[in-house]
Image: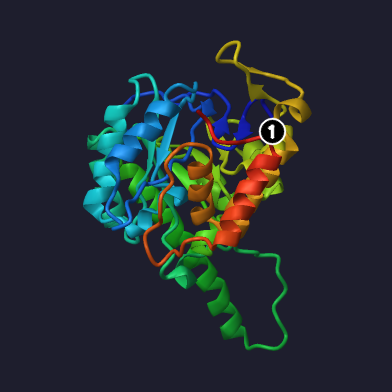
Amino acid sequence: MSAGRLCAADVTSGIKRLSYSTGRTLDLSGIFPPIATPFLEDESIAYDKLEENIKKWNKIPFKGYVVQGSNGEYPFLTPGERVDMVKRVKALIPKDKLLISGSACESTRQTIEMTNAMAKSGADAVMVLCPSYFKASMTSFELMTEEPLPHDIALNQCLNRIYFRVLQLSALTEYFTSVADGSKVPVILYNMPANTGIDMTAPLITSLASHPNIIGLKDSGGDITKMATVVKNTKHLSFQVIAGSTGFLLPALLVAKTVPTSEDKGCHVVNTSESLPVTLQLLSSFVTRELGVPAMKAALDYVGLYGGPCRRPLQPLTSEEVRRVQDAFKAAGYGPSN
């Protein structure tokens, strides 16, 4: 595998790819924080707090930002709010920073429309999740032709089962291909099985990677073996793989064996045990896997940024849970900033 083909926590290698629709190249090397959507107590978007947060983040050498990922509570936003968030964030960040937005909707048509509305509002690329409401028809299965016929069902039932598998794989292939065909900006596949209930397979990802407007994968599932398989199977392509959680940042970097350093824009071999504290990975797992978005927002409040409430039906943390979040960050050496 070529060096630097996979990094993590929204960090990827430095490989450039030609966009099918725009003729642009996008270098995704660097760190892209997935930002929260700040709400007031009445659940309206706190755009002034968004501006305050981004002004602080702009002081950090991030490569760009991700809006409307899972942390952005995008399913709770109206279509107009989703596009407006892209427009407002784009206006607040320097021109040299990339803006990636989550544009997934349940139908192919809606996703294409949302994608291009976000592109018009300033998104440089989009992340697209699997549709998941009809997940029984969307889950991707590989057709295992070498699988022996089950002895406890009739032959016609077995054939129906195999045909159903092909239909399911075809549905996701058609969805992502159509979105990429219709998108005016590059598309990043987004695998988030914890939320969608669908875990994109390595064969599906590999087949989609050949599309000239699909430039990479953000995988939040944490299956390092699958990530390594995708990297290996797409090494002949300019396809960038992003591991979407600090919780498995270190093992993902061990797959890549490189990480961007501050000296320049290239990727260099570094001592990952020193550059990636285990405490940071444990914090990420504690917040995202155990307590979720409300805990992430509580952490923002604790360190001096604005987190604020979530939109219902997400519930606020209990006072005990807030204390646990604060104690965890304090023990790890992350406290309120001045």
Q: How many marks?
A: 1
| Quadrant of the drawing holding the N terminus | top right
Image side of residue 70 versus residue 311, left or right = right
At a point 55% along the width and 60% down the height, the residue shown is 319
Q: Is residue 269 left or right of residue 297?
A: right
Q: Residues within 10 Å of mark 1 (few under 14, many from 20)?
A: many
Q: Is residue 197 above or below residue 10?
A: below
Residue 243 occupies quadrant? top right
Q: Position of residue 306 (x, y in %)?
A: 42, 41
Can residue 248 be seen in this snapshot?
A: no
Residue placed most toward the observer, 236 or 2 = 2
Residue 146 image point, x, y percent: 70, 65
Residue found 21% across the figure and 50% down from its top? 80
Numbered disc 1: secondary structure? helix
Give, as a three-letter code, the residue at label 1.
Leu
Of 51 and 225, nearer the camera is: 51
Query: Looking at the image, which residue sits at the far top?
Result: 263
The residue sitting at 32% across, 51% down in the picture is 40
Q: Position of residue 303 (x, y in %)?
A: 53, 38
| Relative horizontal placement of residue 284, taking residue 311 as reference (left or right) | right
Q: Nearer the viewer, residue 143 or 302?
A: 302
Q: Is residue 213 visible?
A: yes
Q: How is the image coloured?
A: rainbow
- Residue under the image location 51 percent in, 72 percent down: 164
Classify 335 as above or below 13: below
Where residue 301 appears, x then y in whole percent? 48, 44
Q: Which residue is mark 1?
A: 253
